[in-house]
Image (cartoon, rainbow, N blue to C red):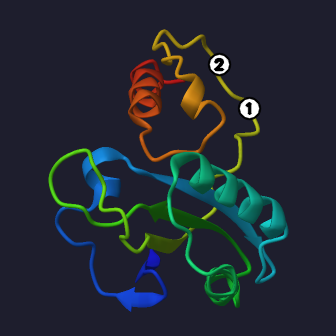
C-alpha cells in the first residue's frame, strides 16, 4: 500500500498519538475507483466529502491542494482504489476537540477488490443490526464498528 499523510497542507511522516480519527472515529472517508490515472467521479466524491465534513464540523484542507494530491496519487495508476480519510486532527484525551486544529488526512492506494466468482455469490440475511442515528445517516464516517461486526458474521458463515 502506498500512503501519504497530511496535517492541513503539510506532509507528515506519522499519525501522532491522540489522533481523534483513531481514538473516536472522528472523521469521514471516500473510497474512489481510479481508472487510467484519474478518478472519474471526483466531483461527486469531493461534494460528498465536503458535505460530510460540514455535517461533522470538520475543517477541510484547501480544495485545490486536496484535488492536486488526489490527482498525483491517481496519476500513473491503471486501475486501483484510492481511499481518502479526513479527521478532525489532534486534541488529546477527551471528547471535546481543539477548536482550531488543522485537519489530518490520509490518501492511500489499494488494489481493486477481486471480481465476483463465475459460480456466483452466496448471500444471507445479516443478523447484526445497525443502530439508528439520524445525525449520521448517509455519512461515510470513520466509526464503522457495526460494519466490521457484520462482516465478521459473514466470514464465519462463509457468505
* Position of residue 111 measured from the top left corner of the image (x, y, whole percent): 58, 66
* Position of residue 51 measured from the top left corner of the image (x, y, whole percent): 68, 52
What residue is disc 1 on? 119
Which quadrant is the N terminus positioned in? bottom left
- Does 100 sit left or right of 55 as displayed? left
* Position of residue 16 measured from the top left corner of the image (x, y, whole percent): 21, 72
- Callout 1: SS: loop
- Callout 2: SS: loop
Categorize mark 2 by other alpha carbons within 10 Å: few (<14), some (14-19), many (20+): few
Q: Which corner quadrant of the image does residue 101 belong to?
A: bottom left
Q: Which corner quadrant of the image does residue 30 belong to?
A: bottom right
Q: Residue at x 55, y 76 (%)?
A: 61
What residue is disc 2 on? 123
- Mark-to-mark CA distance, 1 and 2: 13 Å
Q: Identify which residue, 21 or 115, lies in the foreground.
A: 21
Q: Residue at x 28, y 66 (%)?
A: 90
Q: Residue at x 45, y 47 (%)?
A: 142
Categorize mark 1 by other alpha carbons within 10 Å: few (<14), some (14-19), many (20+): few
Which quadrant is the C terminus positioned in? top right
* Position of residue 134 measured from the top left corner of the image (x, y, whole percent): 59, 23
- Does 60 sit left or right of 70 as displayed? left
Q: Nearer the viewer, mark 1 or mark 2?
A: 2
Amino acid at each position: 500500500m502506498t500512503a501519504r499523510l497530511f496535517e492541513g497542507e503539510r506532509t507528515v511522516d506519522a499519525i501522532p498519538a491522540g489522533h481523534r480519527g483513531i481514538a473516536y472515529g472522528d472523521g469521514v472517508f471516500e473510497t474512489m475507483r481510479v481508472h487510467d490515472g484519474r478518478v472519474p467521479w471526483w466531483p461527486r466524491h469531493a461534494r460528498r466529502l465536503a458535505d460530510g465534513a460540514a455535517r461533522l464540523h470538520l475543517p477541510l484542507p484547501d480544495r485545490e491542494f486536496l484535488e492536486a494530491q488526489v490527482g498525483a496519487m491517481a496519476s500513473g495508476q491503471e486501475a486501483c482504489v484510492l481511499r481518502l480519510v479526513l479527521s478532525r486532527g489532534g486534541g488529546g484525551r477527551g471528547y471535546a476537540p481543539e477548536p482550531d486544529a488543522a485537519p489530518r488526512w490520509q490518501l492511500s492506494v489499494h488494489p481493486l477488490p477481486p471480481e465476483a466468482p463465475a459460480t456466483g455469490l452466496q448471500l444471507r440475511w445479516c443478523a447484526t443490526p445497525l443502530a439508528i442515528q439520524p445525525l449520521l445517516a448517509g455519512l461515510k464516517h470513520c466509526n464503522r464498528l457495526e460494519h466490521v461486526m457484520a462482516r465478521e458474521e459473514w466470514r464465519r458463515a462463509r457468505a
